[in-house]
Amino acid sequence: MIQEQMTVVKNSSIALDTFEMVLTSNTIPQRANSGQFIHVEIGEGNEHMLRRPISIADLDQENGLITIIYKVMGEGTKWLSKREESNVLNVLGPLGNGFDLDHHVGDNILIVGGGVGVPPLYHVTKRLSQHNNVTAVLGFQSKEAVFYEKQFSQYAKTYIATDDGSYGHSGLVTDVINQLNEPFTTFYACGPNGMLKAVQNQLTYLEGYLSLEERMGCGIGACFACVCEYRSQKGYVKICQDGPVLKASEVLL
Amino acid sequence: MNLAVSLGELELKNPIMPASGCFGFGKEFSQFYDLNTLGAIAIKAATGEARYGNPTPRVAETSSGMLNAIGLQNPGVDGIIENELPFLENYETPIIANIAGSTLEEYVHVAEKMANEPVIKALELNISCPNVKEGGVQFGTDPQLAYEVTSAVKSVSSKPVFVKLSPNVTNVIQIAEAVENAGADGLAMINTLTGMRLDLHSRQPVIANQTGGLSGPAIKPIAIRMIHEVRKQTNLPIIGMGGISTAEDIIEFLLAGADAVAVGTANFKDPFICQKLINELPNTLEDYQFNSIQEVRESRCHNPSISL
């Protein structure tokens, strides 16, 4: 974990209110792992006192690049969406614990993403596809919100579901999962808590990991803002420090 | 330039410390810089038993500030002594233990245990947390209760006791007077202001606890005003806090009446902020024609007869 100036290589809209940004620097990309996140300082002066935690969607260590995908939700992400090539961002990272994937060989893996929960699963899918059979089920609100279908399709059998039925399967990711007849061994999921809870309940028989999102303060484990309940430890674990990737069977949503 | 300050019997090598609740127990920030550079460290609040805090979301950004309602999550006084203090023993920096509770007995229990720890050099009596249902702020908004809890904690503590005051009162001077009469060795002010933010899409509060404590530069003028008011009434050392993010802010707090300062929210924006402020303070003091911290304290804009 370090603080580093990262240069914007690219920042463009890829779906409704959704932007893809590529950043470069010497150290953070080299140290990063899939599933980790970066904490990005926003704006000039003191208007924005909190950084924005954004998961790493893709990683190119050879060229020192990190790709993030974020949705414009408020003033902070709106500011971020206006950054241009060669602008510099103050970034803290890489933060949190990523996905532990190296033990998977010849496994049948299910990836489940919802909305802005899809990005952290992209690099995971890429990596897993090298030695495993991967299926991705990605949910979005509507056709306009869909992104990265083509990219996922290169590495996984990919299904898209939309809430309003305007694209792909009409309905929820859990509906799609119900129709799949694959003997999955593990699942990895990220998305809104409602979706994660549904997936958790649906796939109790599988080993699974969830990547959680939460409003964060420091992002490094000092402020106790982003916590979630954990079965094996009475109380809470910190999403920024102990997560964001946590065992599905342990997390109480 | 010598930045050392004395807060009664508590000697600090510089007047800058991270504020309680914004720095955990130091471990995370020690990955960024040497904690020995700090004037002191105010560690996260301790209660009698472990507390799990409030539901999430617990934080929300606001203009030049943030709301938080963590709810005093902490492993309890015994957990802190066992698992957190040993790490801090590696440093020479004085550690200030923040003490919280639901009842007077709990405050006394926690204070006694913490005061007996050699690594703890002072207590910060938290009678101003706005985010818990019981205890916390009710002791800080009623002069009689503030007197009683301070007096009880003083009777069991061999270490100096700084009482952390709430800004959520009409008359902060009354509370300051009450705790001084009860034997407080100093004041820490201000804690956060109760605030709220609503989400227009959900039409619900952003923070699960509904309300949270507002901190950050947005509250700095209130902190300055309150410290200025209280300084007119007391000679007690004051640790000032509320939105500090620059060396100029520190001088403003010192001019208002503070003797040392704590930096809270700014640690989240820049984890190196305390170290930066310590490095910048000498030059900034010179920019305003001060040759020492003492000179700033002597040039306070009111009641020059008060000697500190």
Image (spheres, rainbow, N blue to C red):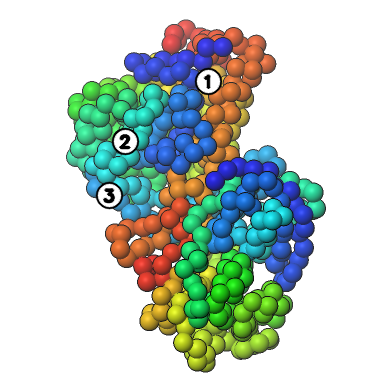
Q: CA distance from mark 2 to mark 3?
A: 16 Å
**Element type at mark 1:** helix
Chain under numbered label 3 = B
Q: Residue at x 42, y 37 (%)?
A: B26
The residue under label 3 is B50
Quadrant of the rendered structure where residue B143 is?
Answer: top left
- Residue with the mark numbered 1: B254
Discs 2 and 3 share one subunit: yes
Whole-percent x and y of residue A15? 72, 71
Give the residue type at disc 2: Leu
Q: Nearer the viewer, mark 2 or mark 3?
A: 2
Report in which chain the residue with disc 1 lies.
Answer: B
| Residue at the image point whose x is 57% and y is 43% from the top | A2
Q: Amino acid at mark 3?
A: Ala
Front residue (pair B62, B287): B287
Asked if the residues shown at circle 2 and circle 3 are in contact, with their CB atoms under 8 angstroms apart, the answer is: no
Sequence order check, earlier mark of 1 and 2: 2
* Circle 2 residue: B85
Q: Quadrant of the C terminus of chain B?
A: top left
Q: Secondary structure at mark 2?
A: helix
Task: Name the residue furthest right.
Answer: A85
Q: Nearer the viewer, mark 1 or mark 2?
A: 2
State whether residue B36 appears in this view. yes
- Binning the other alpha carbons within 10 Å of mark 3 as few (below 14), some (14 to 19) or many (20 upward) gives some
Residue B102, placed above or below residue B300 = below
Give the amino acid at mark 1: Leu
Q: Position of residue B306 (x, y in %)?
A: 45, 10
Q: Secondary structure at mark 3?
A: loop
Image quarter of the N terminus of chain B = top right
B145 horizontally vs A148: left or right: left
